[in-house]
Image: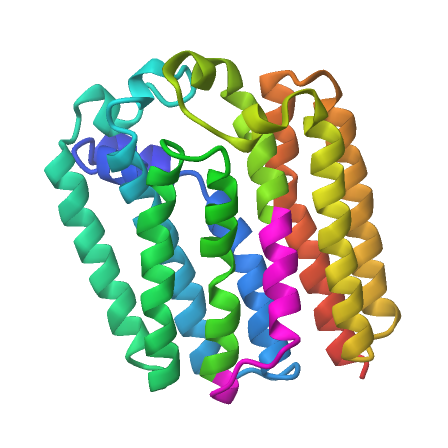
Amino acid sequence: MFEVIHKRYPKAWPWIQLMRLDRPIGTLLLLWPTLWAVWMAGEGSPSVKTVVVFTLGVIVMRAAGCVINDYADRNFDGHVSRTRARPLATGALRGRDALLLFAVLVSIAFVLVLFLNRFTLYLSVGGLALAVLYPFMKRFTYLPQLFLGAAFSWAVPMAFAAETNSVPVYAWLIYTANLLWTVAYDTEYALCDKEDDLKIGIKSTAILFGEADRPIIGLLQGMALFALYLLGQQLQFGWPWHTGLALAAALFGWQHWLIRERQPAACFRAFLNNQWVGLVIFAGLLLQYLLA
């Protein structure tokens, strides 16, 4: 589909690239934990409205996050091999174009939240703040992945607020698990750009962790799975949930095999593999509720 758009509507292509609509991996990584929370908040039967609003919200806010990220990195992306073809780096679009598009996307997200309750609306302000803050953190801290994890996990309390008008304590186990998982997979992603980032002064956990990167990634993944295991214990989940976690652990093992030599292409494959981690956990959750 995007190849057709590229050929027939070449002027639209830079805008699609800027929103990363041609690269759905980020949307999926944001969508899966959001759906975990929506289904748990709805105890296996969430309202159709909540599912639709949050699914559309994920698409819109992921696009907005990409736009503001590229705006923040517009003077750096041209020096990184993986990002030098992005529209702001090539000059296909200007900085003010990105800010205008960001404003439009955030406005759409705001309209979507208006279909939910006031508590969710209030929480959405925090999500917007994290989305705007994250891209600039790589200038000041070696932990920008931590801020990304916080932003990517903010849909969790929002989902519970939308379904139940409250945020139970166990919702923060989901939040914590997703934050840890996000730091792990975004570190794999950062390994792809490590050499370029060192040259231009961009900070990341891949640089901070140094030679301990692989053990720390494994530790983060293990802690994320343990948080989800504790969640299952609290909600009295059975074998479907634990099977999903076991499959996720196997996928993590495959990722460690891929990144064993820290080759950028292999690290990127490991990063992409995380879409299946989110899927198998969601599948286990669905099966858990279907068989309950």
Looking at this view, is 273 or 177 the one in front?
Answer: 177
Q: Position of residue 22 (x, y in %)?
A: 39, 39
Q: Image point 24% across, 64% down: which residue? A: 108
How many numbered marks have been drawn onto this rendered protein structure?
A: 0
Vertical position of residue 119 compared to residue 184: above or below:
below
> From the image, which quarter does the C terminus lie in?
bottom right
Taking the image as shown, residue 128 lies to the left or right of residue 44, namely: left
Looking at this view, is 145 or 251 the one in front?
Answer: 145
Res. 170 image quadrant:
bottom right
Q: Image point 34% across, 42% down: which residue? A: 66
> From the image, which quarter does the N terminus lie in?
top left
User: Magenta span covers which residues?
Assistant: 163-181
Q: Position of residue 254 (x, y in %)?
A: 78, 34
Vertical position of residue 53 compared to residue 258: above or below:
below
Res. 267 image quadrant:
top right
For the question of whether residue 1 can be seen, the reply is no
Vertical position of residue 43 compared to residue 136: above or below:
below
Q: Image point 72% across, 16% down: which residue? A: 261
Q: Position of residue 249 (x, y in %)?
A: 80, 47
Taking the image as shown, residue 270 lies to the left or right of residue 74, namely: right
For the question of whether residue 245 can be seen, the reply is yes
How would you classify the magenta stretch by its main secondary structure?
Answer: helix
Q: Image point 53% across, 68% down: which residue? A: 156
Can residue 139 be found in the magenta stretch?
Answer: no
Can residue 180 be found in the magenta stretch?
Answer: yes
